[in-house]
Image (tube, rainbow, N blue to C red):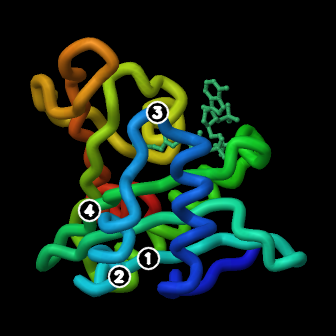
Amino acid sequence: MNVRIMQAQDIVTVLGIEQSANQFPWDIKSFQDSLKTGYQAWVFYKKTEEIVGFAIVQRVLDEAHLLNICVKPAAQGRGLGKAIIQHVIDYANSISAVIILLEVRRSNERAQQLYLQSGFNEMSVRKGYYPAKEGREDAILMAMDLDLMSFFSQ
Ligand SMILES: CC(C)(COP(=O)(O)OP(=O)(O)OC[C@H]1O[C@@H](n2cnc3c(N)ncnc32)[C@H](O)[C@@H]1OP(=O)(O)O)[C@@H](O)C(=O)NCCC(=O)NCCS
């Protein structure tokens, strides 16, 4: 799998993947604003240039916030999610971030499994953070302490 910086012309494809993989997808403006604001955004693509996933990270001083990560449904379950997370970790280390933070829906067990396997821990719960089919849904706030990770990898 290859990676490059997300460009404005990728947004239509990225939006399609987002809509096909999420019940409550980001809208086009969220992607446009992310690029305008200068968030770190990548697309992951096959040899054929077909985009199969993406990730968007906001850098806040020495923190990296993973705002969105998505793999095209047809390409899920083959290790791409793990590879994208590793790319995000490498990026966070390259900017000397001390922590990576993210929010995930309580019902999204698949993503939570991926994060736990990758070294994230559950920090807290944000009550009713997301819109849901009926009412609201909690977010689990997860974090990876990069200082601790580098300590253990030495
Ligand atoms: C979450 C997501 C990025 C994972 O991508 P993926 O390419 O399917 O993930 P991987 O193939 O690398 O699998 C990584 C781990 O996820 C978990 N996982 C994958 N498929 C799963 C499934 N069907 N059920 C439960 N857990 C699953 C497993 O723990 C897996 O590790 P393992 O293969 O060693 O058991 C992808 O499912 C996705 O894009 N979902 C929609 C968008 C989304 O939910 N984004 C996260 C928002 S916080």
| Disc assigned to residue 65 | 4
Place of residue 27 in the rendered image (x, y in percent of width and height, measured from the top left): 37, 56
Q: Amino acid at mark 4?
A: His
Question: Gap in Å between the C-alphas at discs 2 and 3?
Answer: 23 Å
Q: Categorize mark 3 by other alpha carbons within 10 Å: few (<14), some (14-19), many (20+).
A: few
Amino acid type at circle 2 is Leu
* Residue tagged 3: 23
Q: Nearer the viewer, mark 2 or mark 4?
A: 2
Point out the frontmost of discs 1 and 4.
1
Front residue of this view, candidates 46 and 61? 46
Look at the numbered discs 1 and 2 and tell me whether their residues touch, using CB distance below 8 Å: yes
- The disc, 2 or 4, on the residue closer to the chain's N-terminal end is 2
Left or right: 32 with respect to 63?
Answer: right
Check disc 3 and give the amino acid type.
Answer: Gln
Percent of width and height locating residue 137: 23, 22
Tell me which residue sits at (44%, 76%) in the image: 41
Task: Specify which label sits upstream in the sequence, 1 or 3.
Answer: 3
The location of residue 69, given as percent across then percent down, is 47, 55
Q: Compare marks 4 and 3 and give the one earlier in the sequence.
A: 3
In this figure, which residue is indicated by the disc labeled 1?
41
The residue beneath circle 2 is: 35
Q: Is residue 89 above or below residue 21?
A: below
Q: Are marks 2 and 3 in contact (CB under 8 Å)?
A: no
